[in-house]
């Protein structure tokens, strides 16, 4: 193995792959994560979702996000370590004992690569020739870059998770089902209470859509309770806005304008997730009968008309997929969550 040019080439490719993946995942604000990140985190989440569907456990999913993040960061360091180890194995004189000048063994080269990328620099092993003095400098810079990037990434993730849950709680405060939201904000058919809450929500939801692109791992932070779930909040709010726009023809123009803007923001959010994380379900999700909704002030449609309208909306398939991929069921959108 020591002295193989092919081994050095493989190591170089691994180093470049990790650097590319880390940069694309953490610094690119307009695309999804790198190839390593996408496969690793989506694979782990798919396994956890499968287990959750067999033995329902929102607690397990809620603890997955931090561990997936740590696993990703460890994978970057391990692959970088492996890459530099293989590169230092490509030449017998790449690493030698600093005291005896004896050629380092495989284990000693792994040790040398490890303490070099962690910038510890013990000095008991050194480069054996002049041309191998520069690679350890690059290895140390690579390790320092990954460490700094990881810390910054974790801090940003924590901030964005807090904003994500704050937005969900803001919607849940209006109601934990479309019926509750409409019943508490109808204002005898004017919906002034609802529209007053929409303006701050518009900015929050638009920002969250871009944050999901900038920090793709954010999608895998699950909330144990329905009141903190962004997927349920988005789905419920979309049903509410769509119903009011369709079934309440006597709205004031300013109210209708705010509702239409909110609907566009929600659809843009779903388009963002659909472009990177979610594929729409094959079939439209079931819409419950809306008999009670007919009694709401301002509603001028029958329950069947409202049912058929909601069922015909193309974004319902994407919303259902978002809810399912987040570990919830479609009926959780329409029913008050038992776990507040």
Image (spheres, helix red, strand yellow):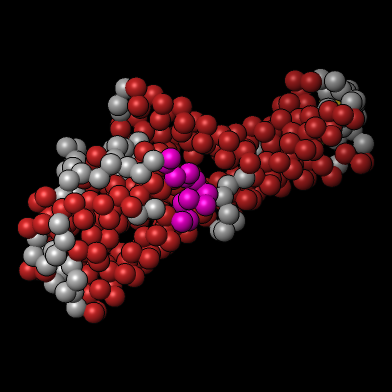
Q: Is residue 153 left or right of residue 23?
A: left
Residue 84, percent from left and from top? 76, 34
Which span is picked out in magenta?
A: 271-282
Q: In which image quadrant can residue 126 be found? A: top right
Residue 205, percent from left and from top? 37, 60
Can residue 19 be seen here?
yes
Can residue 119 be seen here?
no
Query: Residue at image x 56%, y 34%?
Result: 40
Query: Residue at image x 58%, y 47%?
Result: 33
Q: In which image quadrant can residue 81 be found? A: top right
Looking at the image, residue 54 lies above or below residue 200: above
Looking at the image, residue 259 lies above or below residue 240: below
Residues 300 and 60: in front is 300
281 in the magenta segment: yes
Residue lying at the far bottom of the rendered structure = 253
Residues 305 and 291: in front is 305
Residue lying at the far right of the rendered structure = 130
Residue 29, percent from left and from top? 56, 58
Residue 6, percent from left and from top? 87, 29
Q: Is residue 318 left or right of residue 299?
A: right
Query: Residue at image x 67%, y 33%?
Result: 79
Residues 174 and 95: in front is 174
Query: Residue at image x 15%, y 57%?
Result: 302
Quadrant where the N terminus sits is top right
Q: Is residue 130 left or right of residue 249?
A: right
Quadrant where the C terminus sits is top left
Q: How many marks?
A: 0
150 in the magenta segment: no
Looking at the image, residue 111 lies above or below residue 174: above
Q: Is residue 149 left or right of residue 163?
A: right
């Amino acid at each position: 193995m020591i002295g193989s040019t092919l081994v050095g080439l493989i190591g170089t490719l691994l180093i470049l792959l990790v650097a590319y993946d880390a940069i694309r995942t953490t610094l690119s604000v307009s695309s999804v994560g790198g190839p390593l990140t996408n496969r690793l985190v989506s694979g782990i989440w798919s396994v956890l979702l499968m287990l959750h569907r067999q033995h329902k456990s929102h607690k397990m999913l809620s603890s997955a996000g931090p561990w997936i993040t740590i696993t990703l960061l460890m994978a970057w360091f391990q692959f970088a370590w492996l890459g530099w180890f293989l590169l230092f194995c490509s030449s017998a004189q790449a690493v030698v004992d600093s005291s005896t000048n004896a050629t380092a063994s495989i284990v000693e080269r792994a040790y040398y690569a490890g303490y070099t990328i962690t910038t510890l620099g013990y000095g008991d092993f050194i480069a054996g020739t002049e041309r191998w003095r520069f690679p350890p400098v690059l290895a140390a810079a690579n390790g320092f870059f990954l460490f700094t990037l990881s810390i910054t990434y974790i801090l940003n993730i924590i901030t964005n998770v807090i904003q994500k849950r704050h937005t969900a709680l803001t919607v849940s405060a209006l109601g934990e089902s479309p019926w509750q939201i409409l019943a508490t904000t109808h204002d005898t058919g004017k919906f002034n209470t609802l529209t007053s809450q929409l303006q701050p929500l518009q900015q929050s939801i638009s920002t969250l859509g871009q944050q999901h692109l900038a920090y793709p791992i954010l999608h895998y932070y699950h909330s144990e309770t329905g009141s903190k779930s962004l997927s349920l909040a988005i789905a419920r709010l979309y049903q509410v806005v769509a119903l009011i726009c369709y079934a309440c023809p006597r709205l004031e123009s300013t109210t209708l304008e705010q509702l239409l803007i909110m609907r566009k923001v929600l659809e843009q959010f779903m388009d963002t997730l659909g472009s990177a994380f979610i594929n729409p379900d094959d079939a439209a999700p079931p819409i419950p009968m809306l008999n009670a909704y007919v009694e709401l002030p301002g509603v001028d449609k029958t329950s069947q008309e409202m049912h058929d309208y909601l069922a015909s909306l193309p974004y319902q398939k994407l919303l259902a997929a978002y809810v399912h991929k987040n570990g919830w069921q479609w009926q959780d959108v329409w029913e008050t969550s038992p776990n507040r």
